[in-house]
Image (cartoon, rainbow, N blue to C red):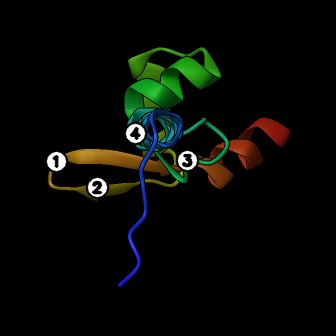
Amino acid sequence: MAQEITTVEDLQKFRLQLLEDIKALVQPPNQLAKQWLKSPEVRKMLGISHGTLQNLRIRNILPYHKVGGIIFYKYDDIVKLLEK
């Protein structure tokens, strides 16, 4: 059975790769990659108030989905609204 020797350089490379992997998992996804947005994110993105966002929902201008009391909006629907 062959034995391999692990060097300090090997451990350094492993450490750096491990740190990069952890950072990729912890970092929030960028806005374009995110498919569903919560109300505060949508208000910030559109630069509107809570009441204006509620009016967009009530008048069926901006579709939404409610899951467990939290309202979610599809990113694509927001882009369509901005294009109008």
User: Of the residues tagged 3 and 2, which is closer to the observer?
Assistant: 3
Q: Position of residue 48 (x, y in %)?
A: 55, 16
Q: Nearer the viewer, residue 8 or 78?
A: 8
- How many angstroms separate mark 4 from mark 3 (CA)? 19 Å
Q: Which residue is mark 2?
A: 66
User: Of the residues tagged 2 and 4, which is closer to the observer?
Assistant: 4
Residue at 38%, 36% in the rendered image: 26
Q: Which residue is mark 1?
A: 69
Q: Nearer the viewer, residue 15 or 61?
A: 15
Which label was assigned to residue 34? Answer: 3
Q: Position of residue 75 (x, y in %)?
A: 60, 48
Mark 2 or mark 4: name the one nearer the start of the chain.
4
Residue at 40%, 32% in the rendered image: 39
Q: Is residue 66 above or below residue 23?
A: below
35 to the left or right of 14: right
User: Of the residues tagged 4 and 3, which is closer to the observer?
Assistant: 4
Q: Secondary structure at mark 1?
A: loop
- How many angstroms separate mark 3 from mark 1 (CA)? 20 Å
